[in-house]
Amino acid sequence: MIADVNNCFRETGLMLSRFVTSVKSAKEAERILKLPVLGSIPTGEGSSGLQSTHTPHAKWQSAATAGAVRSLRDALRFAVPPGAGNAILITSAERGEGKTSCAIQLAVALAQSGGRTLLVDADLHHPDVESRILPSPGRPGLADFVFDARTFSHVITSSPIAHLDIVAAGARTRRSDERGHATRLDEFFDTARRLYDWVIVDSAETNATGDVLWCARHAQAICLVVRVARTRKSIAQKSVDRMSKAGTRPTGVILNFARPSFPRLRGSEQNAGPSPTSEARIRDFPKICPSCNRVFLDVDDYLTNTTRAEDTGAPSSSPGSDLDVRWLRACPCGTPIIVSGVNRRDPSDMGQTRRQVFGELLDRLMQGGAEREEARSDLMLTLKIWRNELAAESHLPLEADDSEAALQRRELFCETLDDLVKAGLSRDEAQDQLLSAIRVWRDGV
């Protein structure tokens, strides 16, 4: 009995000590770290673990979180000088600060605003992006590109969210400091920055590994995630000092788990939709929201307490994607929640059409003298990058965009077009076939 009381006092003392020594407000973070607070996100406020499905989710939380992420997005647009680059690195001093959630929400916000966005999981020791967003793990990713010479197109995963692609961490079978690491990483980020308007990098923690410093060299903005009442002041300061000495001083702070400044309003958003099959019921539940940790125990709970995907700007289904996604709906906090099958090969008519169109274009390119693997990689990259370039219900590209990334995307299209012309097609025929293939790819994703 006495031992239990002593343990209770000891644990209470540790909690009080951590609270006293931790960052507790935006004003305190700016004073201690000498950095501006770029955004305060109330994600997960009041929760220290998985939230019960039966806990009412407040409408304020959905609105507050979405609004905070949009404010962060806008702040970063001003923080990065025009023409300076488009890579933003998200890191934290220690694990458990919520950097991955912040990176995912920021990437989704940028994509929903129309920017072609690439989300990269660069935390090779503790990767988490793939398991939070995609329905089945094991895709090739950054580690495969860096250490196994995989092509850029091979490691891109098409997301069901419009304008958002993902690069998972990939295999972790080799040391992150292996010879050749820097050169290949340079090549990866050079390609990513050329083809995307935004590159969001979820990196390792600054005090755990040197990997973050390698990635930080390629970032135009570095955000340090600080969790309210958890991140210790001394550890955060040490993190800033370490990065500053390496020439990669953080641009600003993202204050995570910040308390909102207005009262909680109870209520939940309900919106029914199409019923998933029994296969989805077995495979995908319980389902956990990657941002707010809300648990959906079964399909009925999922349909009752989520909203249509159209409300988030994402497609409601994507029967032809690499992910074999079946349903996409939004959690009350605004995060897309995917219910899907495990098999990535799409057996639907759309999936067969995609494979047929791809095969026909690949044969054409090989007839023009291109090597199969090189032609396959280049064609795959063109289709994945250009799936978001065509206007809805049209074969025509979207309105002209004069950004450097947009010019690079057009150059990629023209190079593939030239290769088809070399194979014997007229330029008009080559353009029609390529645009038709891109539209099939777009509609299937």
Image: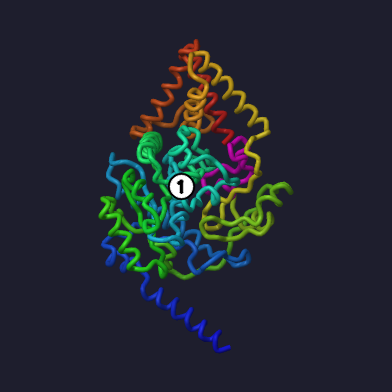
* 322 is within the stretch colored magenta: yes
* Tag 1 secondary structure: strand
Q: Which of the 4 image quadrants contains residue 183? A: top left
Query: Quarter of the image containing the N terminus?
Result: bottom right
Query: Quarter of the image containing the C terminus?
Result: top right
* 390 is within the stretch colored magenta: no
Which is nearer the eye, 10 or 334? 10
Q: Position of residue 275 (x, y in %)?
A: 70, 48
Q: Position of residue 219 (x, y in %)?
A: 33, 45
Count the marks.
Answer: 1
Q: Which residue matches tag 1?
A: 121
Name the side, left or right, on which 16 lies relative to 131. Answer: left
Name the side, left or right, on which 97 lies relative to 239. Answer: right
Q: Position of residue 214 (x, y in %)?
A: 35, 46
Q: Can residue 418 be seen here?
A: yes
Q: Residues within 10 Å of mark 1 (few under 14, many from 20)?
A: many
Q: Which of the 4 image quadrants contains residue 235? A: bottom left
Asked if residue 35 is positioned above or below residue 144 in the image, the reply reads below
Q: Which residue sits at x=53%, y=16%?
A: 364
Check the image and name the residue furthest to the right: 278
Q: Which residue sits at x=45%, y=39%?
A: 147
Which is nearer the eye, 380 or 328? 380
Give the residues in magenta: 309-329
Q: Which residue sits at x=45%, y=28%?
A: 397
Q: Can residue 261 be seen here?
A: no
Asked if residue 237 is positioned above or below residue 101 in the image, the reply reads below
Name the side, left or right, on which 28 lies relative to 131. Answer: left
Residue type, label 1: Asp
Which colour assignment does the render follow? rainbow
Q: Position of residue 425 (x, y in %)?
A: 50, 12
Name the side, left or right, on which 142 lies relative to 443. Answer: left
